[in-house]
Amino acid sequence: MLGDKDAIATVAVRDLGQARKFYEGVLGLRVEDAQGSEAITFKSGTSLVIVYRSEFAGTNRATAINWSLGNDIEKVVQALRERGVKFERYDMPGLTQKGDVHAFGEFKTAWFKDPDGNILALMGR
């Protein structure tokens, strides 16, 4: 029923202006639609990310969005670090770490947070 339909990521934030600076200015997402003071829809590749104002912003303690980067993960991590992004470090069984990138065998990931504390991730090989 939904297998051939697009999914849209949604992320709660407290301050839409600050979120726009981060998602557009730091991460490089393009504004698709700005719905007044309540939400902004960003374009990320062929996907959409809706950032909306909520009192519950930053309360999710799990990853909210993943970006699939293939072999570009280290290059993107470096570029985001140069833009001031601080990467998270997690200690998990079977995990090895090289700088800000964590590896599970051939799978690589790097986690960081937006200004509201939402956990975002990059994935690659």
Image: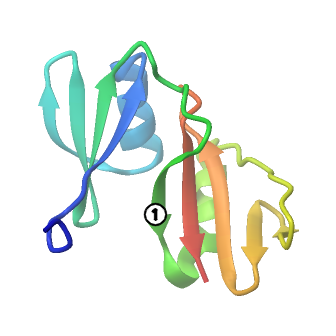
Quadrant position of residue 56: top left
What residue is disc 1 on? 67
Give the percent coordinates (x, y) of residue 105.
76, 85
Q: Residue at x 75, y 74 (%)?
A: 103
Residue 99 as seen in the image, left or right of residue 71: right
Q: Is residue 49 above or below residue 35?
A: below
22, above or below 35, in the image: below
- Secondary structure type for disc 1: strand
The residue drawn where x is 38% and y is 36% is 11
Q: Quadrant of residue 79 in the image?
A: bottom right
Q: Is residue 74 left or right of residue 103?
A: left
> Is the residue marked by circle 1 packed among few (<14), some (14-19), or many (20+) residues within 10 Å?
some
Figure label count: 1
Q: Amino acid at mark 1?
A: Trp
- The image position of residue 87, as x and y in percent, is 71, 48
At horizontal 36% and vertical 42% (from top left) the residue drawn is 24
The picture places residue 70, in percent across and down from the top left corner, at 51, 81
**Considering the image in quadrants, where does the N terminus appear?**
bottom left
Which residue is outermost to the front? 1
Residue 10 at x, y = what percent? 32, 41
Residue 58 vs residue 83, the one in the foreground: 58
Q: Nearer the viewer, residue 124 or 83?
A: 124
Quarter of the image where the C terminus is located: bottom right
